[in-house]
Amino acid sequence: MIATILLFSVPLILAAMGEVVGQRAGMIDIGQEGKILIGAFVGFIVAKITGSLIVGYALAVVAGVALGCLSTWFTAKLQLDQVVVGTALNLLALGATSIAFRIYVGDSGKLLSIDKAPALFGLDPVVYLAILSPAVIWFVLMKTSWGLSVRASGEYPPAVEAAGISVIRRRFEAAMLAGGMSGLAGAALSIALSGSLGEGMSAGRGFLAIAVVTFGRWRAPWVAGAALLIGVIDAVQYRFQGQAILGFKPPLQLWQALPYLGALLILFALGRGAGAPAALGRAYNKER
Amino acid sequence: MKRAALLVGSLLVILGVTLAVLGLPVFESMKLLFTGAFGSSRGLDSTLTKMTPLLLVGLGVVVAWRAGVYNVGGEGQFVIGGLAAATVAALLGKNPSGVMQVVVLAGGMLGGAAWGWIAGWLSHRRRVDVVISTILLNFIAIFLLQGLIAGALRDPEVNLPQSARLEDSLRLMRFTRQGDLHLGFIVALFGAAALWFLLNRTTLGFKLKLVGANPLLVRAQRLNADRLRTFAISLSGALCGLAGAVEFAGVNHRLGQSFNQNWGFLAIPVAVLGGLNPIGTAFAALYFAAVLAGARNLGGFSQNGAAIVAIVQAIAVLGFMAVNQWLSRRREAVREVAE
Amino acid sequence: MSELVVKGVRKTYGSLVALDDFSATFRPGEIHAILGENGAGKSTLVSILSGFVTPDQGGVSLGSRDLPLGQPTRVRQLGVSMVHQHFALVPAMTVEENFALDRLWSSKGLLNLSELAGPALELAERLDWAVEPKARVADLPVGVRQRVEILKALVGNAPVIILDEPTAVLSAEEVEDLFRVLRSLRDEGKVVLLIAHKLDEVLSVADRFTVLRRGKWITTADRGDVTKEQLVQWMIGDQLNIEPAGRKLGENVVCALRKVKANDETGVLRLTVDDLEVRAGEIFGIGGVDGNGQKELAEVLVGITAPVAGTREGDPSVAYIPQDRQREGLVLDLSIVDNISFERTSLVGFAIDNPKARRRLATELIERYSIKVSEAEGPVKSLSGGNQQKVVVARELNTKRDLIVAVNPTRGLDFRAAAFVHSSLLAAREAGSAVVLITADLDELRELSDRVGFLSGGGLKLGGDASAMLEGH
């Protein structure tokens, strides 16, 4: 059971860790979903072609980094609306992967599968990566010079510029890290969790990651905890689907909706509250 | 006018580039797309049918975003609109009067409005970000749809999870015997006109624009910004819900698992490209609907209509906004020099 | 130690001469106060000295070195440190983190907070200025936040430190403490420049004074050679006592504030008014330097901000000409017609709009207020500042209101536009409205007011003695 929970949580934790960095720098990235989708495809297909899982993971990360760069170019450099840019990138990813899927798989509808990585102490190695990631992200954000300036960029950009550091540059770097994490999350989803490739397989995990960051109060360890909680709900619903509880048999879809419903209820209970980066969602314009 | 021509031209270029990237012969495919969309009555029918939900949800996006409320929950509100319409239809029983069509559509609007209102209320009362809550509500709505068509609304005579067929008298009138185009198209056009009227010819619409453009001024004028925003997202939900109801009563006549066709997401670029105004949105919806319908003509790529549209949309909206930004910056620079 | 020398500096903005041929020498080991009313040219001078603004003529040197004006970072590195009124602090972070952020250029890789923040904290200790390194800036009182900002400016051991209105937000004890530190900085041989307007405070700390009026240098004098009365005279010229014409006031009290206290958005108490009655048919002028509770008074009168204590009596219909016309008075992206023709009443409820009527009204107002527009349907942001203000004034004064609240309504306007706004306010008074004119411009106050008062440190003092605005709390 624990193995299942972990496996279910892995992509969400990885994506949420990326989103923490991005949001701490002041960017709310709706495009996470698309980055995960691209990561899942690139990772899977590259691994399948080269026969090397590591190369697959690596290229998924590279794809995520590139997408992170692209979206920051629009949001930070051109100062376009973050929601529109994110939506557009999601559509781009959706369209591109769907066409790639048809080209690669054809219309036969056959399921593509891949051999999973050899287990390490009974768990897929990527699980360890996910377990480590909150500590790493926490360390990078809280214990490095770079992390300090990233956090300040999301809170009060003028102070960063006053200290002689470029806010836009920091946002670029943060978005690249966040994108890389999303790409990794996608590859983990297709290679480790499902072992197969499907259209639209991100299934809203990128969106959940955004919600998880809010109720983890923008702190990496708490966010990881929140992601794990959603992972537990997800694993539980998967396990109990179709079973009767106290003589009542809830419909399958109620189970499937549980993670999203849970996220919404938690947000309702917590409210926005304190902790949100003050400049979240706003482009920084030096002249104003 | 010059700008409109520029826009149309660049949209064609973007389409061409996308086709080229996909490895298709550009001019031939464009011709195929065009004839597919407009070249036959069947093509035109399909284009306008697809334009209907795109336009209605696009209008929903327009009204919310103009008021500064980032409703990205069109998808969920569309689904709830369809569900509400189907529920109302089921409650009306056998052989209801045709007039009841209005009630079915109103039910859909109400359902969508309620779904939008939830996000407005969460934002107003609990300061939950509208972007996040509407995204989550999308998923909840989709699972609700799937649960209900497998449960309460299920047609017992069919082996698939589907709602019962809509009574004939409740179906929206179709314009031709063979085609799908239905009265909902007129409803959508009327919706665009009505929204244009609301935004440009009423004080309420003006207030909505004010709260989106300058919340501080709204405060200085002692207006209640939260109430205006909640109203905007409810109206937005109503329009998206109407789209769902119209799609249900006009095209599908029953709810299936693939009832939501990503209309909610596709409509965001439609509204943005339409300059967040109802008339522009109608043209943007027509353009994307044409690509969607015309893509059927692309032979081996026939399955990828929606995918091509998604890509074209993404590139178009990013390019459009980037160029707009560049133009307005240049204008500002010119002004500064002039002063 | 080297002198900071300003030589013949001139700066104009369009037709406005902000600073005219200003020269001065600021010596090491002195606290030098620069005095003047709003618009005297203080902030222009400070912006030039700290490198944010390039003057049209003249230059500044520190010792033997000319400062590269227009390059704030370079100027700071060369030793001119500036403490702005608006702090460059990250509220959500700790004091230590803010110190570290400012010196982050000297660090890569691992974050060593204690090392980066060390110099500032040591300095704090030396100055006997306690700051808790682990405290979040947002939780600190304003006075302590300012300490943090000043310490940041001092860390590089800059020989020149400029403080812009540092006492505006401080309590009396905090001011005393700040002055103690400024004195010890002076004793270390630094040039300390203090921009200020509250004379009692400044007299207790400064060694020399330079007075500016309307962009011109008036005098520079030693502490021993001046009296308070003399400084007041220099600063505000010969208009010291404002004696209203003494019109007979109307009986009808339109709006009254009783024992009102009001906070700003951050929850800091900014306004204390014991008793204020505004009557129909008068212009009640309220003078004073910006940031002394003006905005809060206006918003309480208009009814936007609810007082935290006390009551606002009366329920008048209100017209409001806010200080920040671009942010609160206009929607910059909407057309001139839209901006000029919507008014409060038409915004209530749902009504069918009549664009023709609005256009007609707009054309009429544009004509009547002689607003220079190329196209009435064009965005209001394409207008000049003066014409933008006319749009606001035209809209707000077009319909008769019981109460009109105007905050610095002629700031930045040319003579003709200002005269027009004045005559509009006078006409509104004649029509029976009560007008509250909150302004930093003494001429305006004298010309228009029937009764006057002055705001200083959030307190309202009635009567025409203009030196009231130069008092402390």
Image (spheres, coloured by chain):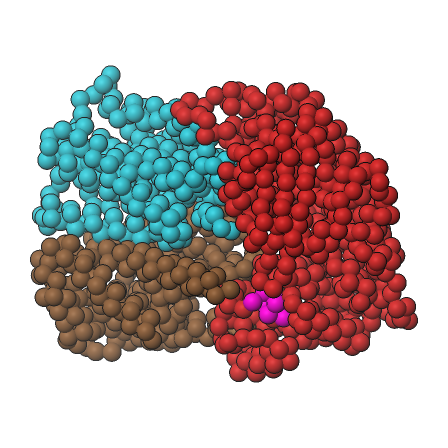
Palette colour of chain C:
red
- The percent position of residue A275, horizontal first and vertical second, equals 52, 36
Q: Is residue C27 above or below residue B125?
A: above
Quick one: which residue is furthest to the front in this view?
C64
**Who's the residue at 34% across and 75% down the image?**
B1
Residue B123 located left or right of residue A109: right
Q: Residue C22, percent across and down?
A: 66, 50
Residue in the foreground of this view, choosing between B208 and C360: C360
Magenta stretch secondary structure, dominant: helix
Q: Quadrant of residue C203?
A: top right
Residue B207 visible: no
Q: Is residue C387 magenta?
A: yes
The answer, for residue C283, to whether it is visible in the render is yes
Q: Identify which residue, A254 or C469, lies in the foreground.
A: C469
Using the image as rendered, state which of residue B149 and residue C1 is in the foreground: C1
Identify the residue at image location x=48%, y=57%: B68
Question: Magenta segment range?
Answer: C384-390
Q: Tell me what hue chain B is rendered in.
A: brown
- Residue C45, compared with residue B56, is above or below; it is above
- Chain A colour is cyan
Residue drawn 86% across and 69% down?
C252
Closer to the camera in the image, B3 or C116: C116
Position of residue B210 measured from the top left corner of the image (x, y, whole percent)? 53, 64
Residue C206 located within the stretch drawn in magenta: no
A65 sits left or right of B107 in the view: left
Where is residue C103? Give x, y as percent. Answer: 50, 29
Q: Quadrant of residue B306?
A: bottom left
Please tell me which residue is depicted at 68% across the width and 38% down the height of the picture.
C26
